[in-house]
Every structure is written in structure tokens, then in C-alpha cells.
Image (spheres, grey):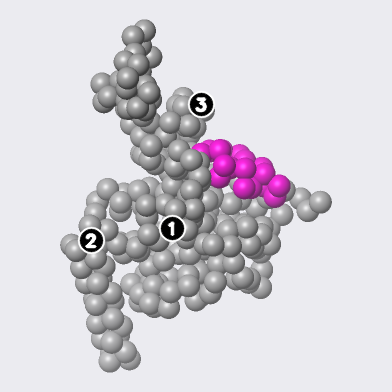
């Protein structure tokens, strides 16, 4: 037993060092390993799960694409009846099982588009997942299948000005504009709330005089741009022009519609 624990501890330490190496060499890492990420990005990940806690108390929860498992652990520790974590990476699941184990928490290696369990879930959490999945429509279908009647889905993704299949992030296969993303869910879910996180809105200032040469060349000088920085997480109530959102995330709180 002690030898097994030592083996798992060595595995986890190596896993953490690889993540730290990615941070030092590339300035970023694909996975959130708690304590081994730049503070800004770690806070973004953590704050999503802290927001989710208001929905998960005394609920059967599925964390789809749970990664290394700290967020999954947090929901299990803070009042969920039970939590299932699912990820495609065997290493991530192994890491989570050793570092963040709890009696009311189980993890499985599985594909997010095909995973199913022997019961339906009251709440499904899927943070920063869908933009990685080529078959995102199949993924949404599977979320619907795994959710109980009137169940709640919390799902987040980055915001771009225009939907693109060539995002800058090499790990993403697609990124959506603010409203295009919401439209993906309209057939199967009702939107209860739209939360926005760390948004940066860059709007052109309205001026009476405008340099016609710059207009022709489609150049807008910095002094003509107004930058608005949003809060850590806030409810979207129309306070910003989201068509001018330069960066940030949205978190949708959705309710499952009855089958037609």
C-alpha cells in the first residue's frame, strides 16, 4: 500500500513539473493543475467553480471534461450529494484520484460526446470544454441525454467578436461570438442566466471629426478606442455592447427543455 502511494505521489509530482515546464517555456499550459498555473488563469478557473456551487448543493452532479479534478473535488466537498468527473485523459483522472479524492466523488476516463451513466444528473458542469470538441453538436446532444428533467446545465466558453474555426489558441477547434454560442442551445435548453467573466470591451469613441484617410485604410487610432474592463464574474443585463467584446468568457445557466 505504501509503495503504491509512493508511486502515485511520484506520478503526480512529475505531472505537476510538466505543467510548470509548459508555463516556463510557453507561458501557458493546456490543463489547470491547481497551484501550477499563472494566478490570473487559475483565478478564472477557480471562480467558475465557486460560482457553480450555488447550483450543486445536495445535487447529483456531472463535471464533464473535469481535467485534473480540483473543481470536481470542490463541488463534492462543498455540499453536492455526489459528483462524477469525466475526462478523456487517463493521466488527468489518475492525478485527480490521488490528489483530490472524496467518498462522494468518482472519476471516469471517457469521451464527453458518448459518456453515459446509470442515472441522470441534476446538474451538469462543463467549463472551457466545448471549444475543444469537433463534434460540438453531438456533445450538446449528450449533455441533454445525461441531464434529468428540468435539470441545470452550466457551460462556459471564450467570447470572440466573430465565430471562427481558426482560433489563435492551438487547443481550440472553434470559438463563438457572444450570441452565436447562445443560439447553439435554443432547441434543447432555455437560457436562465448569462454570466460574463473578465470581459474586455473595446469600442470606438463617437467623435464629430474623423480622419477620412484612416477610415479608408480601416485604421482606428488608440485614442479613438474606449476600453471597458468587466468584473470577475457578473450577470449580463445588456450593460455592454458584446459585439465589441475583445476577450473574456461567458457562462450560460440553462434548463433542459421537455422532449418534443
Eye-nearest disc, 3 or 2: 2
Q: Position of residue 89 (x, y in %)?
A: 43, 74
- Is residue 231 something that shows in the picture? no
The magenta span reads 178-194
Pick whichever, 252 or 1, lies toward us: 252
Relative side of 234 to 191, left or right:
left
Marked residue nearer the N-terminal end (2 or 1): 2
Relative side of 255 to 106, left or right:
right
What residue did someone put label 3 on?
A: 238
Does the CB distance between marks 2 and 1 fall below 8 Å?
Answer: no
Number of residues whose C-alpha sits closer than 10 Å to that of mark 2, classed few (under 14), some (14–19) or many (20 or more): few
What residue did someone put label 2 on?
A: 26
Q: How far is the residue under mark 3 from the one under mark 2?
A: 36 Å
Q: How far is the residue under mark 2 from the one under mark 1?
A: 16 Å
Residue 159: mark in rendering: none
**Residue under the point 33% across and 72% down:** 99
What residue did someone put label 1 on?
A: 172
Q: Secondary structure at mark 1?
A: loop
Amino acid at each position: 500500500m505504501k509503495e503504491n502511494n509512493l508511486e502515485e505521489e511520484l506520478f503526480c509530482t512529475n505531472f505537476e513539473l510538466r505543467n510548470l515546464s509548459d508555463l516556463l517555456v510557453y507561458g501557458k499550459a493546456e490543463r489547470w493543475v491547481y497551484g501550477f498555473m499563472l494566478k490570473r488563469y487559475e483565478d478564472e478557473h477557480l471562480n467558475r467553480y465557486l460560482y457553480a456551487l450555488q447550483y450543486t448543493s445536495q445535487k447529483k452532479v456531472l463535471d464533464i471534461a473535469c481535467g485534473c479534478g480540483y473543481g470536481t473535488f470542490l463541488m463534492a466537498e462543498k455540499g453536492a450529494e455526489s459528483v462524477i468527473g469525466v475526462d478523456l485523459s487517463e493521466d488527468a483522472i489518475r492525478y485527480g484520484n490521488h490528489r483530490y479524492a472524496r467518498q462522494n466523488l468518482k472519476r471516469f476516463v471517457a469521451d464527453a460526446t458518448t459518456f453515459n451513466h446509470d442515472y441522470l444528473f441534476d446538474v451538469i458542469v462543463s467549463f472551457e470544454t466545448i471549444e475543444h470538441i469537433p463534434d460540438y453538436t453531438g456533445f450538446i446532444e449528450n449533455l441533454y441525454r445525461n441531464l434529468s428533467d428540468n435539470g441545470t446545465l452550466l457551460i462556459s466558453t471564450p467570447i470572440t467578436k466573430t465565430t471562427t474555426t481558426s482560433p489563435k489558441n492551438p487547443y481550440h477547434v472553434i470559438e463563438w461570438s457572444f450570441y452565436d454560442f447562445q443560439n447553439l442551445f435554443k432547441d434543447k435548453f432555455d437560457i436562465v442566466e448569462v454570466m460574463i467573466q473578465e470581459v474586455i470591451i473595446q469600442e470606438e469613441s463617437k467623435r464629430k471629426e474623423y480622419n477620412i484617410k484612416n477610415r479608408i485604410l480601416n485604421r482606428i487610432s488608440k485614442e479613438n478606442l474606449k476600453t471597458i474592463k468587466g468584473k470577475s464574474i457578473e450577470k449580463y443585463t445588456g450593460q455592454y455592447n458584446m459585439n465589441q467584446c475583445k476577450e473574456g468568457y461567458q457562462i450560460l445557466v440553462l434548463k433542459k427543455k421537455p422532449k418534443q
